[in-house]
Image (tube, rainbow, N blue to C red):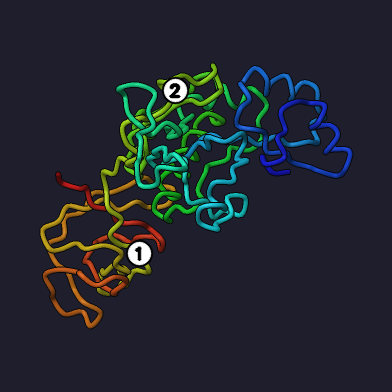
Amino acid sequence: MSTQANNTNWYSANFWHEQGVRRIILARELSLKEILEIRQNTPKTLELETFVHGAMCISYSGRCLLSNVFTGRDANRGECAHPCRWKYSIVEEKRPGEYYPVFEDERGTYIMNSKDLCMIEYIPELINAGINGFKIEGRMKSSYYVATVVQAYRKEIDSYFSDPEGYNMDPDSLEEIKKASHRPFTTGFYFRKPTAQDHQYLDSHYIRQYNFVGMVRGYDREQGLVEVEQRNYFEVGDQLEIMVPGEGYIEYKVNTLLDENRQPILKAPHPQQTVYLPLDREIKPYSIMRKKIIE
């Protein structure tokens, strides 16, 4: 049952369960205390899922019409154009062309621009509230974004279950998440009602520290070459990080770069071109190569 159904209490949760629903995605507006109350008053056969990371919708549980009206892209079908991130001005009906800025005070004019949700530092609290599924907002996101965020959460969840009593979050997991494009983070409604500190008024820009430059497609054991599908420009001399599924990342200096015919080249400028990189260990397919953006 989608979060669009505004599931905010255990009465409605039990009703939908009686209709055959086996998992409910709870409204984003619930606190951990309220989620725990729902868990205590619903059967274990009903699974509860909540958003733990990603873009926060300014409208109540995603009930937004702006995207549909302005662009024809339905927010309820995964095509949201994020009009809540735009900068708005007022136009009076009889004064077309005269734009008056919309702002709350000197902080800025992006009055509907929420910070991104991030709950990776609170895995034990989420699990102990009885949440069965953690939902990461990944619509309209790249495979690099999804891989980065999912791997970090997976690592922390597995670490917690392996030793609940001795668990401490690895700070590197939070730093890893920051390597995907993001806005400043907030904990949303989990611990308190959001305040002005949970919005970003000055702009709607993402913080972007790395470029996704290549996807590993295979490994030639005989020649020790990694086959890579290029996604963004990189060249000989670049320092890369290779994200290996389930292993974190390894650092890699591009000293040699070969084209699809395995001839030396100096750069990889063409989107989705096949290139080869020498490496003395096998790299899993779908490993991701990234390059730090130098300002």
Residue most extreme to the bottom: 261
* Depth check, front residue: 201 or 215: 201
For badge 1, the amino acid type reads Val
> In this rendering, would 200 be left or right of 54?
left
Q: Residues within 10 Å of mark 2 (few under 14, many from 20)?
A: some
* Depth check, front residue: 70 or 94: 94
Q: Which residue is mark 1?
A: 216
Residue at image position (39%, 23%) is 104
* Mark 2 touches mark 1? (CB < 8 Å): no
* x, y percent for residue 26: 67, 34
Q: Earlier in the sequence, mark 2 or mark 1?
A: 2
Residue at image position (52%, 34%) is 58
Name the image quarter holding the C terminus. Answer: top left
* x, y percent for residue 87: 37, 40
Name the element at disc 1: strand
In the image, residue 24 sits, relative to residue 191, either above or below, namely: below
> In this rendering, would 210 be left or right of 91?
left
Q: Residues within 10 Å of mark 1 (few under 14, many from 20)?
A: many
* x, y percent for residue 226: 29, 67
In the image, residue 245 sits, relative to residue 59, either above or below, namely: below
* x, y percent for residue 203: 32, 36
For badge 2, the amino acid type reads Asn
Task: Estimate the spatial distance between the alpha carbons at disc 2 and disc 1, rounded to whole Å.
Answer: 32 Å
Name the image quarter holding the N terminus. Answer: top right
> In this rendering, would 97 be left or right of 150?
left
Residue at image position (61%, 54%) is 77
* Depth check, front residue: 182 or 132: 182
Q: Which residue is mark 2?
A: 168
Q: Which image quarter: residue 31? A: top right
Residue most extreme to the right: 18
